[in-house]
Amino acid sequence: MNLIAQNKKARHDYEILQTFEAGIVLQGSEVKALRAKRANLKDSYCRFIKDELFVVNMHITHLETAYRSFVPDTRKPRKLLLHRKELNKLFAQSTQENLTIVPLMLYFNEKNKAKISIALARGKKLHDKRADLKTKTLDREAKQAIKQRNH
């Protein structure tokens, strides 16, 4: 797996319930830009448009070496490729249970296909975020104390 971009804020803002791997519809110059790791998943989300799932607000920077007269929109919605059963499941759960679909990471798999990992997630409350930060800092301090004790 060759990681291109990661949405670190998603794990902070959301409680991840279930993850899916989806293909993504791209144009040639966008694939070249992804190989150069010129993508950003910050503030992106997924939504259903006419029974199909799209990732919205994902930024792929245009390469200067690509064809100049064809400059695609860098933040256009990009279609995600999933099986119909998975799409139906995601649609049902996201509408009935008030869940959000967020992209977690963008990567190339072993067959050099661009894939995006999406998750069905529930938004965290402020006190949940604080509790997570507290446990992380306690774990970090404990690891540092063990490391110092061993030296």
Image: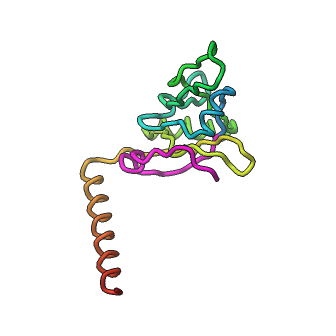
Q: Main secondary structure of the magenta part?
A: strand
Magenta-highlighted residues: 1-22
Tell me residue 16's x, y (percent): 46, 51
In the image, residue 7 sits, relative to residue 72, either above or below, namely below
Tell me residue 72's x, y (percent): 58, 19
Tell me residue 100's x, y (percent): 45, 39
Is residue 32 left or right of 61 when viewed as pictured? right
Who's the residue at 65% across and 33% down the image? 32
Residue found at the very far bottom of the displayed protein: 150
Membership of 21 in magenta stretch: yes
In the image, residue 123 sits, relative to residue 31, either above or below, namely below
Residue found at the very far top of the displayed protein: 69
Toward which corner of the image does residue 115 lie, by quadrant? top right
Query: Viewer-proximal residue, 114 or 63?
Result: 63
Q: How many discs appear?
A: 0
Query: Viewer-proximal residue, 50 or 146?
Result: 146
Who's the residue at 54% across and 25% down the image? 77
Tell me residue 53's x, y (percent): 59, 31
Who's the residue at 56% across and 44% down the image? 4
Query: Viewer-proximal residue, 119 or 150?
Result: 150
Is residue 100 left or right of 20 when viewed as pictured? left
